[in-house]
């Protein structure tokens, strides 16, 4: 396989794995209170950045991956995938907010019916 193509694929794969981990973290964090949510999201971001930095350094130092195609592919795919991640996380948040709102509405209706009866 061509070294440039291998470098591009490695960059794209690394950004896909990073954004995939972010999506899993966001999904777990949405089920928590807001303070815990922020801690989980920001903490995982720092951890993922550190891991990605170590992986990039390891790939560039100890493999035959070419730096320029790898870095360009990583940053372009990372930027595109982060935009997609933002849209998906926003949708997940909206669905969670709608579920909470329906739950509160049902609870309020039950209490109102209990008071009437």
Image: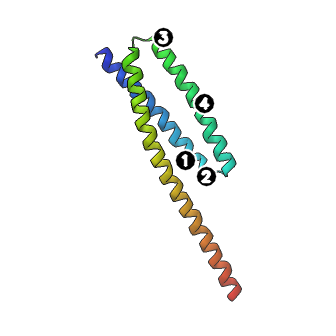
Q: Is residue 26 above or below residue 46?
A: below
Q: Foreground residue, 79 or 14?
A: 79
| Label 4 with label 3: CB-CB less than 8 Å | no
Mark 1 and mark 3 in contact? Answer it, CB < 8 Å: no
- Residue at screen point 38% across, 26% down: 73
In the image, which disc is placed on residue 76?
Answer: none
Where does label 4 land, which residue?
A: 47
State the mark number for residue 27. 1
Instruction: Pick out the residue farthest to the right.
Output: 115
- State the CA–CA distance, disc 1 to disc 2: 7 Å
Give the residue pinned by disc 3.
61
Label 3: state its secondary structure. Answer: helix
Image position, residue 54 (x, y; %): 55, 20
Label 1: which secondary element = helix
Give how far across and how far down residue 11 sits, in percent: 41, 25
Residue contact between numbered discs 3 and 2, judged by CB atoms under 8 Å: no
- Is 37 positioned to the left or the right of 12 in the image? right
Q: Are marks 1 and 2 in contact (CB under 8 Å)?
A: yes
Q: CA distance from mark 1 to mark 3?
A: 34 Å
Q: How many marks?
A: 4
Residue at image position (39%, 20%) is 70
Q: Looking at the rendered structure, which numbered label has been put on residue 31? A: 2
The residue at the point 54 percent across, 47 percent down is 27
């Amino acid at each position: 396989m061509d070294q440039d193509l291998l470098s591009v694929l490695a960059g794209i794969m690394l950004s896909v794995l990073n954004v995939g981990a972010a999506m899993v973290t966001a999904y777990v964090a949405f089920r928590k209170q807001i303070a815990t949510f922020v801690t989980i999201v920001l903490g995982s971001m720092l951890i993922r950045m550190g891991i990605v930095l170590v992986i990039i350094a390891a790939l560039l130092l100890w493999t035959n991956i070419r730096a320029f195609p790898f870095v360009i592919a990583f940053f372009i795919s990372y930027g595109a995938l982060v935009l997609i991640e933002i849209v998906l996380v926003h949708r997940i948040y909206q669905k969670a907010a709608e579920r909470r709102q329906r739950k509160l509405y049902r609870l309020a209706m039950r209490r109102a019916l209990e008071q009437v009866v």
